[in-house]
Image: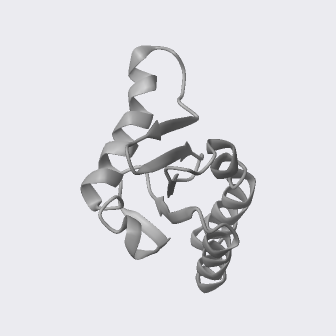
């Protein structure tokens, strides 16, 4: 099943040439699964993943409720961090990528996360 989820993540990566990488990490910032091309290897470092998870948790501390997603734009890339119940999904795209295109991957990724969580119990 895990291999199937990895294949589906790869298919999402290949579906849109503007998507550079996708990482699924637990709420402790430990990567569970990732697919990416060389253009975003540095972006998806352990430190970067840890920072995304910390930002998503920060909304809870502000008393504004849980943070569902964070959208970030950089000089070379755009990043969407999605707080799914079971884990965190980080999607990296080229700077020219529409954030809407990255957000449109959310339902497919959440379905994969559910499949993965059923596998791990």
80 to 33, vertically: above or below: above
- The residue sitting at 69% across, 50% down in the picture is 101
Residue extending furthest toward the left: 47
27 horizontally vs 118: left or right: left
Residue in front for this viewpoint, 32 or 41: 41
110 to 62, vertically: above or below: below
Residue in front for this viewpoint, 59 or 93: 93
- The residue sitting at 38% across, 75% down in the picture is 38
Quarter of the picture holding the N terminus:
bottom right
Number of numbered tags placed on the structure image: 0
The spot of residue 102 in percent (x, y) is 63, 51
**Colour mapping used in the image:** one colour
Quarter of the picture holding the C terminus:
bottom right
The spot of residue 66 in percent (x, y) is 54, 27
The spot of residue 36 in percent (x, y) is 47, 72
- The residue sitting at 66% across, 59% down in the picture is 109
Task: Tell me where residue 58 sits by quadrant.
Answer: top left
Residue extending furthest toward the bottom: 3
76 horizontally vs 93: left or right: left
61 to 12, vertically: above or below: above
The spot of residue 39 in percent (x, y) is 39, 69
């Amino acid at each position: 099943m895990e291999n199937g989820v990895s294949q589906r993540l790869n298919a999402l990566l290949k579906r849109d040439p503007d998507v550079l990488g996708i990482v699924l990490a637990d709420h402790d910032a430990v990567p569970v699964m990732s697919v990416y091309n060389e253009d975003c290897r540095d972006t998806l470092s352990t430190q970067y993943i840890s920072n995304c998870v910390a930002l998503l948790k920060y909304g809870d501390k502000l008393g504004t409720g849980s943070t569902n997603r964070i959208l970030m734009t950089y000089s070379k890339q755009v990043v969407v961090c999605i707080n799914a119940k079971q884990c965190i999904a980080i999607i990296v795209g080229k700077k020219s990528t529409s954030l809407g295109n990255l957000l449109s991957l959310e339902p497919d990724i959440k379905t994969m996360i559910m499949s993965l969580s059923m596998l791990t119990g």
